[in-house]
Image (cartoon, rainbow, N blue to C red):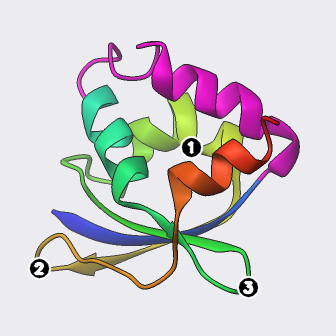
């Protein structure tokens, strides 16, 4: 299934998250690591600071494994909604937004 995901970044963890996204730690995670990295590359941040992305997941509970292993460490207030396919959203690219916190 595909999901529209909205969440708030835990800004104090931005540097750690960016490092893990870049160093292969997350992409090497099976079975969903590369999808998480790809999703963060698709993600945007809106004017309210909400991060939005679309993600594919096959868990019976939406993003269960992704949340347990990655997402809940770096985001609060995460919500999901079933959609038909990947979507694009308006906003600042999330990866650029993350880099703001690493300087």
Examine the structure image and report whether residue 26 is included in the region drawn in magenta: yes
In space, the residues marked 2 and 3 are separated at their CA atoms by: 25 Å
Whichever of labels 3 and 1 marks the residue nearer the N terminus, that label is: 3
Residues packed near mark 3 inside 10 Å, few (<14), some (14 to 19) or many (20 plus) = few
Residue on which the image places disc 1: 71
Q: Which residues are magenta?
A: 10-31
SS class, disc 3: loop
- The residue drawn where x is 15% and y is 62% is 1
- The residue drawn where x is 18% and y is 70% is 86
In space, the residues marked 3 and 1 are separated at their CA atoms by: 19 Å
SS class, disc 1: helix
> Residue 69 location in percent, x, y?
52, 28
- Frontmost residue, 62 versus 33: 33
* Viewer-nearest of discs 3 and 1: 3
Residue on which the image places disc 3: 48
Looking at the image, is 21 positioned above or below residue 88? Answer: above
Task: State how many labels appear.
Answer: 3
- 89 left or right of 91 in image: left
Residue on which the image places disc 2: 84
Residues packed near mark 2 inside 10 Å, few (<14), some (14 to 19) or many (20 plus) = few
> Residue 17 location in percent, x, y?
64, 32
């Amino acid at each position: 299934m595909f999901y529209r995901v909205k969440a708030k970044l835990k800004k104090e963890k931005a540097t750690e998250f960016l490092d893990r996204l870049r160093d292969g730690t997350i992409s090497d995670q099976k079975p969903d690591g590369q999808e998480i990295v790809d999703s963060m590359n698709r993600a945007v941040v809106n004017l309210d600071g909400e991060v939005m992305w679309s993600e594919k997941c096959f868990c019976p509970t939406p993003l269960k494994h992704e949340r347990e292993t990655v997402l809940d460490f770096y985001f609060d207030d995460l919500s999901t909604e079933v959609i038909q396919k990947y979507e694009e959203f308006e906003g600042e690219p999330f990866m650029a937004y993350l880099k703001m916190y690493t300087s």
